[in-house]
Image (tube, rainbow, N blue to C red):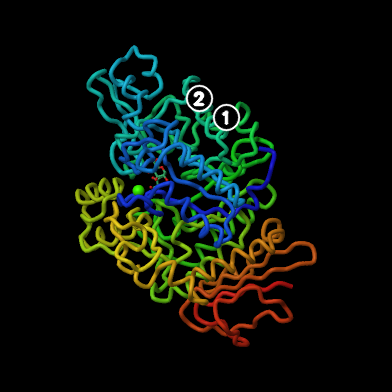
Amino acid sequence: MNNSWFKEAIIYQIYPQSFKDSNNDGIGDLQGIISKIDYLVSLGINCIWLSPIYVSPMADNGYDIADYYNINPIYGTIEDFKELIFKLHQNNIRLIMDLVVNHTSDEHRWFKEASSDKNSPYHDYYIFKDKPNNWTGFFGDKAWSYNEKTNEYYLHLFDKKQPDLNWENPLVRQEVQNICKYWLDLGVDGFRCDVINLISKDQEFKNGHNKLILVGKKYFINGPKLHDYLQELNEKVLSHYDCMTVGETVFTTLDDIKLLTDENRKELSMVFNFDHTSVDNFLGVKWLMRKFKLKRFKKILDKYQYGLENAGWYSIFYENHDQRRSVGRFNLDEKMANYTAPMLATTMYLLRGTPYIYQGQELGMTNLNVKDLDEFIDVETKDVLKLMKKLPLSKKYIDKSIRNGSRDNARTPFQWDDSEYAGFSNAKPWIMVNDNKDFINKEKEEKDENSILNYYKKLIRVYKENNLIIRDGKYNDLKPKSNKIFMYERILNEQRMIVISNFTSKTIKMKLPEDCQILLNNYQEIKNNFLLPYQTLVYLK
Ligand code: TEU
Ligand code: CA
């Protein structure tokens, strides 16, 4: 991995189930993606992160893998996949795959053998104990389930259909190396490594100390051998290819990130950290809602912008398939999305780090509006709703928290046009189409010069044209104390870029920079000495 193209990548995440259905069975697929490469090219992105497409019973929408070497037939065949890579590369778009190796599906052959016979060589691929400890998993439930055939408990930090792999076992690590090698040889350009900082567990399996959600998290986050495992994977496989890795890391600190992404240590190219998406919750748990404060948001982003100045690399993003939509978040009025979405995007993507855009974000797609909470179908939402109903919480709180937090918000079909199923499919999709597809859709926005989509295209163009200063420029927050304005500069040699964003619905009196080139503005005009509601401005001097 002695390359740095990942620092110039603009990455677009595709959630295959919801992007485009080519054969009208209601489920997105690989040929669907292929049919939309023109659209990806028109956006200007240069890399795709494809969420899992491997064989899976879909208990967690593909994050539960039953066969790492084959494509889930609902998405197509290996031939379709080869065609996809070939055509993306033809268009100078790279492809990174999702690598989910903290756990497998309980329907993986390894687990089937492991769970039926203590003496099977696969038994030690997983973590079995005679007695469970008190850990809680990420979906709010107990992290251990009973396995009758061997009279033991097995560990699963996510759903019980997602047993954790035992990375202590060198054979498991060898399997992961083989998997990476297989896909790299097929031409993929890297991996997004699912919950990678959970792979090494403290072998004492101590009880956690408190009664909070995620009891025991201290003992399964950034475990003692995490760095060794990552270095080994690099040495054995990744370093032999021109590839990148982005680790999804949960509850990591700045120091962790410095270690994980230090180029000399050869572990990961960059990580996703969720501190800034946790700005409106408590303890990093999105169900525990907290009022948004711009100052807090900036403090978090500043911490990493300054902290990783000389070491490490970072990913910048608002959305992914687990997060709620950014429109309507951060105290912003959903009805003002034509202004707020460009403002949010500008503010975030001119920071230092590799930008990630989640499908539909560029249209200003919104959260899903369901009548009844039971209409949510995601496994996490269901588990958490069940748990919340047992706790002393008001109906109103539960309603708001679930609506905010459900991952279904991000998973509704991509809105291509205003037809019945939004141009995603001719058949009823696997998940509800958002009813605002009539006015939020790709076809309509393409024609409207002032649409969110066209603003994103402009932003991406500006990003590419000024890549050096955005990548390497020194960052300074110019108004860290303000709860209304996010204003920062990026400085490289003689050049200075200034980004100013109004996070409020009010016009604010302020002196604007003079004698600069204006690179971006989400209004037609500039009003001297005033920053308009939700206005965003980018200057270059
Ligand atoms: O998510 C990891 C993770 O920590 C999730 O619990 C996340 O915090 C939560 O979903 C936020 O709502 C990854 C994948 O992105 C997610 O889709 C998977 O369900 C999970 O790992 C298990 O593979
Ligand atoms: Ca299909």
Q: Which residue lies at the image location 59% right of the left edge and 39% below the top edge?
A: 268
User: Which numbered tag is attached to residue 20?
Assistant: none
User: Which numbered tag is attached to residue 173?
Assistant: 2
Q: Residue furthest top?
A: 119
Q: Residues within 10 Å of mark 2 (few under 14, many from 20)?
A: some
> Which amino acid type corresponds to the residue marked 1 in the rendered image?
Leu
Q: Residue furthest right?
A: 494
Residue 99 percent coordinates (x, y): 48, 37
SS under mark 2: helix
Marks 2 and 1, the one that precedes in the sequence: 2
Q: Which residue lies at the image location 26% right of the left edge and 61% below the top edge?
A: 397
Image quarter hosting the C terminus: bottom right
Is the residue 423 above or below the residue 70 in the image? below
Q: Which residue is mark 1?
A: 233
SS under mark 1: helix
Observer able to see residue 209 = no
Left or right, 111 with respect to 83, comes to left
Q: Which residue lies at the image location 32% right of the left edge and 26% below the top edge?
A: 154
Q: Are marks 2 and 1 in contact (CB under 8 Å)?
A: yes
